[in-house]
């Protein structure tokens, strides 16, 4: 029982960080029906920027906020230069461009900060919030989950209560009609990219701040697969679906896989891909997503 | 009728084609004899390896990229997981060679059908999943391959994280091939003879040369088959699906059959590529088949030209040479050393991918064709 509870807590911890990256993917998918393969790398670049700022003596949370701003501006620039000129309905060039960005950003991060893992400063108070027999719920888990919910609430408010949020929702629901009603498509999508990158940077910072992990350029590749599965599971265009998907993937990774004897521990990545396969085959719109209708 | 057939077979166009291919084969053989020994070129203080090992690797990548041409270029399905099949072929071949001492060519008889079947089975979800979703799923597939071969349960077959050694198998050139005679004849050519080394070939050189010729023949066979496939009825069905899936279905194309067929063919080609790769480097190790390899193969596809057969050759060469040369470049004036010691190859390939997609969407091959059309003032042929 103790072990089970501990694993559930682990699931929540991991799931929240996956959910943060998944939220970033969902935002971009909502806006442009594009899956950004470079999302994880953009996030890790942001997290490295945070680390660098912290080395320069800026307090940790200040560094995180500046890092989020930095990656938001960078993402807005990337969208303008590389994404906007392509037809959103033609997926292949867009996938190829994001794969190219993946390679370039990954290489730059590795060149500037090297491949050696570095320890990332603590974002949250260390220690346990709650102990019961051998079960420990760390402050880190609580804060990771809390920040994920907070980000979702903030985004939800941004999208429903502000004017640019309204424009964003209009564009994601129907591009042509919103263009006809005078919405500037480009800047609106740019806004989506910026928000997504900021969420991604926060997610990567929280992920790297996990006391058991260290930051290194390729750490996001694994997280990317988990997050993608989470986003697909929740429905690729649903914000809250990302949280549900993230928690489910975390649960599969930390709880389900542990209790199935014939699946070895290191297969958690494969388990995530299997979940992805099942979801996409049986219910491509995910748990909370909108069903796609095709017209000829 | 006979007259018509006869005249269409011996047009100047056809003579030109024959001359072109003969020239190509002779050039390939000359290159093989010139670089059979490990040679290096020095530019500044950097040494660049030029040897058949690189070219053999390029052949392996070329065949894998040819598979991507079938599934992405001609059928329009965004399948990113070619490294999965590259690895599967490599490991099956390595297992048969190392544990059952099969000869290399015989392993292909197992590799091709099994990769074809696995590809068809994994292609089944693609009947429901489209576009980006398929890209996601296949990328996930590529990402899990290393962890599958590292499984403890498969240790006996795959050798775990250490990899599977196949170097006990040697490629021995058949004795009826006149390698020595040709090498010595080439060495006697005035002025140019120096390029072809000195004296008779050693056993190692002969085996390397034999490998190159064998792999080239295999690649040529693959190209010929794919070329015919694309121009046959299933190939036309594939291109119809690429151009417009709904209208293809309306015109009576069997979507399910055609898509799974193209997945199967692509995977089988990936498997052949993998088998050649392992035969060349002598070990199958998990990290050689990571998701980064899947992306590099996409780079090869795009840089060569999506939907063009010669593009696969260019792509394979770029994948085999660029990262290797980037890592042997240790110093360039005005460039800080830090930028040369990191993953510069990956950076260059990423930049190439972006730049070509932005400015030359058809890759190098289409760019060359456009250039040629401008030069000759001929109409660009629509069949590709």
Image (cartoon, rainbow, N blue to C red):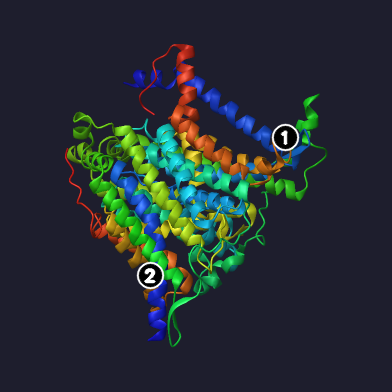
Residue B42: x and y, percent? 77, 35
Query: On screen, B266 above or below A276?
Result: above
Residue A127: x and y, percent? 50, 75
The answer to whether B351 appears left or right of B76 in the picture is right
Image quadrant occupied by the C terminus of chain A: top left
Q: Is residue B117 visible?
A: no
What residue is shown with label 1? B332
Report the Cα–Cα distance between label 1 and label 2.
49 Å
Residue B138: x and y, percent? 39, 53
Query: On screen, B257 above or below B310?
Result: below
Judging from the image, mark 1 belongs to the subunit labelled B
Q: Nearer the viewer, residue A290 or A45?
A: A45
Same chain, labels 1 and 2: no
Residue that lies at the very extreme toward the right in this rendered image: B199
Residue found at x 48% / y 18%: B372
Query: On screen, B109 above or below B156?
Result: above
Residue found at x 54% / y 35%: B314
Q: Is residue B196 visible?
A: yes
Q: Nearer the viewer, residue A268 or B63?
A: A268
What residue is shown with label 2? A12
Residue found at x 75% / y 50%: B203
Q: Residues within 10 Å of mark 2 (few under 14, many from 20)?
A: many
Residue that lies at the very extreme toward the bottom in this rendered image: A133
Q: Give the SS element for disc 2.
A: helix
Please say if the residues under marks 1 and 2 sit with CB atoms less than 8 Å apart: no
The answer to whether B383 appears left or right of A53 in the picture is left
Q: Give the SS element for disc 1.
A: loop
The answer to whether A94 appears left or right of A102 in the picture is left
Residue found at x 29% / y 46%: A30
Query: On screen, B254 above or below A249?
Result: above
């Amino acid at each position: 029982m103790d072990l089970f509870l501990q694993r559930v807590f682990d699931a929540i911890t991991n799931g929240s960080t996956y959910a943060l990256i998944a939220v970033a993917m969902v935002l971009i998918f909502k806006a442009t029906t594009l899956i950004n393969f470079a999302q994880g790398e953009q996030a890790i670049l942001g997290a490295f920027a945070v680390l660098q700022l912290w080395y320069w003596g800026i307090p940790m949370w200040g560094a995180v906020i500046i890092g989020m701003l930095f990656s938001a501006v960078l993402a807005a620039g990337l969208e303008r230069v590389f994404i906007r000129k392509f037809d959103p309905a033609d997926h292949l060039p867009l996938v190829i461009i994001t794969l190219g960005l993946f390679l370039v950003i990954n290489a730059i991060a590795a060149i500037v900060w090297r491949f050696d893992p570095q320890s990332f400063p603590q974002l949250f108070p260390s220690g346990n919030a709650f102990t019961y027999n051998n079960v420990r719920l760390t402050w880190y888990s609580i804060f990771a989950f809390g920040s994920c919910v907070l980000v979702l609430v903030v985004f939800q408010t941004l999208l429903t209560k502000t004017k640019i949020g309204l424009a964003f929702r209009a564009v994601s629901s129907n591009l042509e009609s919103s263009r006809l009603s005078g919405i500037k498509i480009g800047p609106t999508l740019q806004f989506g990219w910026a928000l997504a990158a900021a969420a991604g940077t926060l997610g990567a910072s929280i992920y790297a701040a996990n006391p058991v992990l260290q930051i290194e350029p390729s750490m996001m590749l694994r997280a990317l697969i988990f997050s993608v599965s989470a986003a697909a599971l929740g429905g690729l265009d649903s914000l809250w679906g990302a949280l549900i998907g993230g928690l489910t993937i975390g649960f599969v990774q930390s709880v389900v896989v542990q209790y199935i004897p014939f699946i070895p521990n290191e297969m958690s990545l494969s388990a995530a891909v299997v979940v992805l396969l099942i979801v996409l085959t049986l219910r491509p719109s995910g748990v909370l997503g909108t069903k796609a209708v095709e017209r000829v | 009728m006979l007259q018509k057939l006869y005249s269409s077979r011996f047009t100047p166009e056809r003579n030109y084609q024959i001359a072109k291919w003969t020239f190509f084969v002779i050039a390939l053989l000359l290159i093989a004899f010139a670089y059979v020994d490990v040679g290096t070129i020095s530019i500044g203080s950097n040494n660049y390896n030029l040897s058949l090992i690189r070219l053999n690797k390029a052949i392996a990548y070329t065949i894998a990229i040819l598979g991507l041409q079938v599934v992405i270029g001609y059928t329009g399905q965004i399948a990113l997981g070619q490294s999965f099949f590259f690895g599967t072929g490599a490991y099956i071949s390595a297992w048969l060679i190392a544990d059952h001492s099969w000869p290399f060519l015989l392993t292909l008889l197992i590799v091709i059908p099994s990769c074809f079947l696995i590809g068809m089975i994994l292609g089944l979800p693609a009947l429901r999943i489209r576009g980006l979703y398929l890209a996601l799923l296949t990328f996930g597939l590529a990402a899990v391959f290393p962890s599958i071969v590292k499984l403890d349960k498969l240790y006996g077959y795959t050798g775990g994280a250490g990899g599977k050694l196949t170097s006990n198998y040697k490629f021995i050139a058949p004795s009826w091939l006149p390698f020595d005679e040709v090498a010595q004849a080439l060495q006697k050519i005035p002025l140019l003879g120096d390029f072809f080394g000195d004296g008779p070939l050693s056993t190692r050189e002969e085996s390397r040369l034999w490998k190159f010729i064998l792999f080239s023949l295999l690649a040529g066979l693959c190209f010929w088959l794919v070329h015919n496939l694309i121009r046959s009825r299933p190939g036309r069905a594939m291109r119809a699906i690429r151009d417009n899936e709904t209208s293809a279905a309306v015109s009576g194309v069997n979507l399910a059959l055609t898509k799974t067929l193209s997945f199967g063919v692509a995977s089988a080609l990936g498997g052949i590529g993998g088998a050649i790769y392992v035969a060349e480097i002598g070990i199958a190790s998990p990290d050689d088949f990571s998701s980064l390899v899947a992306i590099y193969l996409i780079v090869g596809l795009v840089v060569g030209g999506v939907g063009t057969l010669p593009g696969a050759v260019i792509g394979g060469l770029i994948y085999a040479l660029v990262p290797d040369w980037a890592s042997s470049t240790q110093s360039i004036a005005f460039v800080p050393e830090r930028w040369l010691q990191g993953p510069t190859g990956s950076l260059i390939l990423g930049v190439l991918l972006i730049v070509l997609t932005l400015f030359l969407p058809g890759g190098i091959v289409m760019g060359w064709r456009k250039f040629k059309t401008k030069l000759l003032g001929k109409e660009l042929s629509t069949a590709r």
